[in-house]
Amino acid sequence: MSKLRGVRGATTVTLNEKSEILTATAELLREMVRKNGIETDDIASAIITMTEDLDAVFPAQAAREFLKWEHVPLMCAKEISVEGSLKCCIRVMLHINTDKSPHEIQHIFQREAVRLRPDLVKE
């Protein structure tokens, strides 16, 4: 029986530039989809956050333009600012319908974001 599950992902950029944010976001989303065998129709929604130092573009644009997620509900938000937290970071929470158990879900952390949850990083 299919259940709703969350798939986490995060990446970083070096510059607050539209092209870099879109490229990094698309790269992250593609890897989340690939590693978990996700079909677009299985995606219930996605929340994408960015740290306060990033504001050049809405990262959901990458999902719509590069992955053609025109019918996936997407929401962008600002990540809360915590002293000492990772800067220039883009985080994603995909909500998917899947038969996989929580332990089978592969969460994807790229670039400097691997420091966020080393316990979830799989090679």
Image: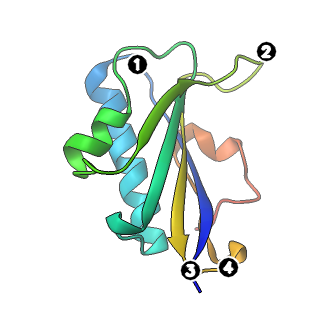
Q: Is residue 25 above or below residue 7?
A: above
Which residue corresponds to mark 1? 15
Question: Marks 3 and 2, how far apart in space?
Answer: 39 Å
The quarter of the picture where residue 116 lies is top right
Q: Is residue 47 above or below residue 43?
A: above
Question: Marks 1 and 3, how far apart in space?
Answer: 39 Å
Instruction: Please tell me whether mark 2 sits on a helix, a strand or a loop.
Output: loop
Closer to the camera: disc 3 or disc 2?
3
Residue at image position (69%, 42%) is 115
Q: Is residue 47 visible?
A: yes
Give 121 or 72, whichever is nearer the viewer. Answer: 72
Q: Residues within 10 Å of mark 1 (few under 14, many from 20)?
A: few
Instruction: Please tell me whether mark 3 sits on a helix, a strand or a loop.
Output: loop
Which residue corresponds to mark 2? 83
Q: Amino acid at mark 3?
A: Ser
Q: Residues within 10 Å of mark 2 (few under 14, many from 20)?
A: few
Q: Residues within 10 Å of mark 4 (few under 14, many from 20)?
A: few
Residue at image position (48%, 46%) is 46
Left or right: residue 61 compared with residue 118: left
The mark that comes first in sequence, 3 or 2, is 3
Q: Amino acid at mark 1?
A: Leu
Question: Marks 3 and 4, how far apart in space?
Answer: 10 Å
Q: Is residue 47 above or below residue 9?
A: above
Residue at image position (20%, 41%) is 65
Which residue corresponds to mark 4? 101
Q: Amino acid at mark 2?
A: Glu
Pick the quarter of the image with the N terminus: bottom right
Q: Amino acid at mark 4?
A: Ser
The mark that comes first in sequence, 2 or 1, is 1
Q: How is the image coloured?
A: rainbow
